[in-house]
Amino acid sequence: MYMWIFLISDAFTFSSLIIAYGALRHRFADIWPDPDLVFTHFPFIHAHVPLMYVGLMTFILIMSSVTMVLAVDAGHRLKKAATLKWLGWTIVGGFLFLGSQAWEWYHFIKGSPEGAYVLADGRFARTDYLEPGILFFNDGTRVVGAEAEALKATAVKNIIGANLKENEYGNTPLFGDFFFFITGFHGFHVFSGVVLNIIVFIMVWRGVLERKKDYELVEKVGLYWHFVDLVWVFVFTFFYLV
Amino acid sequence: MTDMHHEVVSHASEEKAHSALNTKTIWKVFWILLLVTVFEVAISFTAIPKVVLIWTFIALTIVKSYYIVGYFMHLKFEEVPFQWTVLLPFVLIVYLIFIALYEGTALGLIPG
């Protein structure tokens, strides 16, 4: 009951963040980066593979939600060993997700070798690490060869990677700001969830189920964990798919 | 008497929740969530117009939310007044989406 009240308020916080993101993306639609051209990395693959990595992260989180339901189900039947097993797998899933997110943040911040250029005429041109020498614009046009070199030579600025003030993905700091804030806020929720899961794991291990004949603890932490999964479903849609 | 009645009801609903969420149902929900996500990723690479894609993604997100909140968070098996208590506040979110998009469009009319 009290967990539900907290989750409703937390859902309001996340909704506000995502709606603010939507309103500003709507406002700057002409210069907003296409997510398919930003999140293209996958470990050990030297090619553009948009969506696959976040798809994998989504799979990890859904899977950990399933192990959590199984933990709650085992707790309901007061089966200590089964509760510990499934709770343990949920903690593993949580760490896998956090690790994946750290990897994604690393690549987002580090960026590509050449980054992007703010040209003398004010236009914003990105480079492609798989095709050195080309410049491409948000409207899809590409410039190659000597023409591209000339534009680079007169460029006002070269941006590599991303921080809160500028990023190589688009000509607005808002894209990076929202990325860091929303995925960061969600990641912090996942981290808190892993900590809570570990605490409950230790309590169950030390025999709280037998003592209290009640699995409320597992149930509550389970609700929180599914909520974190639910938020990711929305982040996945509005940050990566749309 | 009322207390006793309440206890019987809540016990019954708890039993209902337990019986409805057996391992088979859990895995069924898992496959639905996975297939919907795979489908979303697959259609994002097709040449379907962006507007159609966006509305499909939003609709499918709501489908996924239904399964996560309804089954995993077992709201589907709670008592009806509790379901309303949880869901009704989100009318305000729909209102906020309306305001924000309206304002976002207005912002677009301001140069700079």
Image: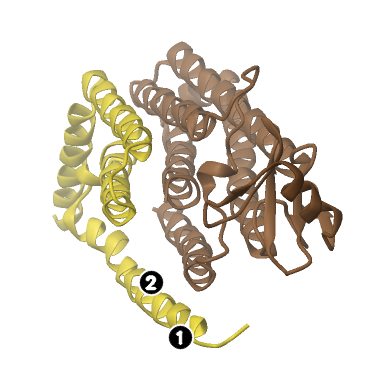
Q: A132 and A53: which one is in front?
A: A132
Mark 1 — on which chain does it sit?
B
Q: Residue at x 64, y 57 (%)?
A: A170
Residue B98: quadrant of the picture: bottom left
Q: Is residue B28 left or right of residue A114?
A: left
The kind of residue on which mark 2 rests is Ile
Q: Is residue A125 visible?
A: yes
Residue A155 drawn above or below residue B28: below
Q: Position of residue B2 (x, y in %)?
A: 15, 57
Residue A119: quadrant of the picture: bottom right
Q: A191 and B106: which one is in front?
A: B106
Q: B82 and A156: which one is in front?
A: A156
Q: Residue at x 49, y 14 (%)?
A: A85
Residue B22 drawn above or below residue A241: above
Labelled pair 1, 2 in contact (Cβ < 8 Å):
no
Asked if badges 1 and 2 are on one and the same chain, I answer: yes
Earlier residue among tags 1 and 2 = 2
Q: Residues within 10 Å of mark 2 (few under 14, many from 20)?
A: some
Question: Which chain does brown denote in the image?
Answer: A
Residue B50 drawn above or below residue B33: below
Tell me the number on the disc at residue B106: 1
Element under disc 1:
helix
Q: Position of residue A28 (x, y in %)?
A: 54, 70
Q: Residue at x 52, y 18 (%)?
A: A89
Q: Which residue is mark 2?
A: B97
**Nearest-to-viewer mark from 1 and 2:** 1
